[in-house]
Image (tube, helix red, strand yellow):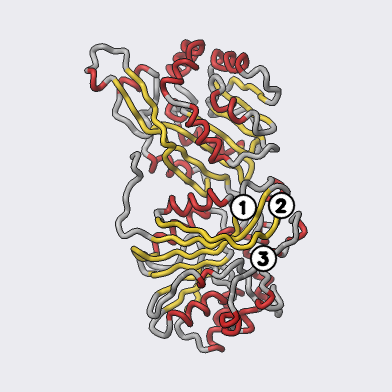
Amino acid sequence: MASETSLKYFNDNAPDWDNMRTAFFSESVREASIAKAWLRPEMAAADIGGGTGFITAGIAPLVREVHLVDQSSSMIEIAQQKLSSFTNIRYHEADGRQIPLPDGAVDVVFANMYLHHCTDPLLSIQEMVRILKPGGRIIITDMDVHPFTWLKDEMSDVWMGFQRTQIYDWFKAADLVNIIIDCTGQDCCAQSHCEVIGESDRNAKISIFIATGTRRQIRQKEVKNTYRVIAETPTGCCDSISSNQCCCTAHSDIFQSPVNFSTGYDQEEKAAIPRESEALSLGCGNPTAMASLKPGEVVLDIGSGGGVDSFLAARKVGPSGTVIGVDMTPAMLERARASAQKNGYSNVEFRFGQAESLPVIANSVDVIISNCVINLCEDKGQVFQEAFRVIKPNGRLEVSDMVSSKALPAHIQAANWSGCVSGALPEGEYLDLIRQAGFIDIKTNRSTSAGFIEDVDVYSVIVSAVKPVNQENCCCQ
């Protein structure tokens, strides 16, 4: 809910708002929001605190329907006049704490320069999340915290910007996942009209952040059950790793082109893999090939499954090294431990745990590998933060995973999660989450495409990154 003083301010300034806005921030803020939303033509969107339609004007041509919600009748009237050529916009004069839309009504919610007018930002964020479909995104752009009290007074603001850590905490409290808070590269610029204020203090230039998050879909139980069944099946998933096919293509009927997908193991590696682990090969690449493993190193395999990559890593780090495999499926752990014992891998340990909460102490691992697992996790951002926590400074991350060229259609997201399809994020968002966790020197090596789903290319990529020795804050904070 915007404060009463904010509501009066916007009602009074509605006729001049568009001219005023151009002095405050540019269209580049809107472009940054749209770029992070991964819009599709069939989507429905909401623009909360939409005012005269700054965000709506940019997204209306890109989606099926837009709901512009604002508490100011005067601002909405201007928006209706400006955007009269669009037939897909619905206008709602309403309190942001009670958005007049049902639960799960839209695919994406935008809120530009709205939150600092809200008396209870967390409540406002939770209401935005309520109207999101599972898997839907929220995009908030607003000012970083600033010292200009005159700006708060003159524009009837409630908040003098925000600490990004506070926004992150509110997103977490709203149970959002894959949270990214970044710079837009844009500033909010304003000048005080009060002549009493000194000249140097009358001009404000405040950086604008963009915060994105995704509504949780509750998929862990489905994934766990699927891989329990695979582990309890005598022949596992694949007849042989030598076929160069992976179980991520199990739902190949949804692809519009032939699936052509290589796991990337060479002949020596294939020969070294225990037969009982080979039958449980569930990967989409070979992360050990890029990891440059050295004798004596400590390696963590996230989502180790039957142990294929753990065993390959164990051979490279040798008896002086250690490999820790972490998996959330007891049946998988049982088979991996049995295979380790049978084949004499004394330098491999398999632990029960979640990728989002690793049973590993901080700064203890030289290299982290993972093979077609992180796409199965809902909160990939939390996975990468955990990876960053446990890896040593200058340690290396080597991940093979499924990604997409852009957002998948909603009906695909609703199915095939355990087939490594629905959980695949756009590659750009996936890399942003790795960067958000603190990794640097991020490099990618794209594998053979797995095929097209409607208009989306889905493929595997090997990502390499490094934990810096010294951590630095974002340049615009």
- In the image, taking residue 404 as reference, residue 7 lies left or right, namely left
> Residue 154: horizontal and vertical position, in percent?
36, 17
Q: Nearer the viewer, mark 2 or mark 3?
A: 3
Q: Which residue is mark 1?
A: 404
Query: How much space separates mark 3 and mark 1, taking CA atoms?
Result: 14 Å
What residue lies at 59% left-to-right and 13% top-to-bottom? 77
Check disc 1 and give the amino acid type.
Ser
N-term mark: 3 or 1: 3
Q: Which residue is mark 3?
A: 261
Q: Is residue 222 visible?
A: no
> Residue 210: horizontal and vertical position, in percent?
46, 38
Q: Which residue is mark 2?
A: 453
Mark 2 residue element: strand
295 and 94: which is toward the camera: 295
N-term mark: 1 or 2: 1
What residue lies at 52% left-to-right and 33% top-to-bottom? 31
What residue lies at 39% left-to-right and 70% top-to-bottom? 366
- In the image, taking residue 356 as reference, residue 330 lies left or right, namely right
Mark 2: give few (<14), some (14-19) or many (20+) Cα within 10 Å.
some
Q: Where is residue 329, by image quadrant?
A: bottom right
Check disc 2 and give the amino acid type.
Ile
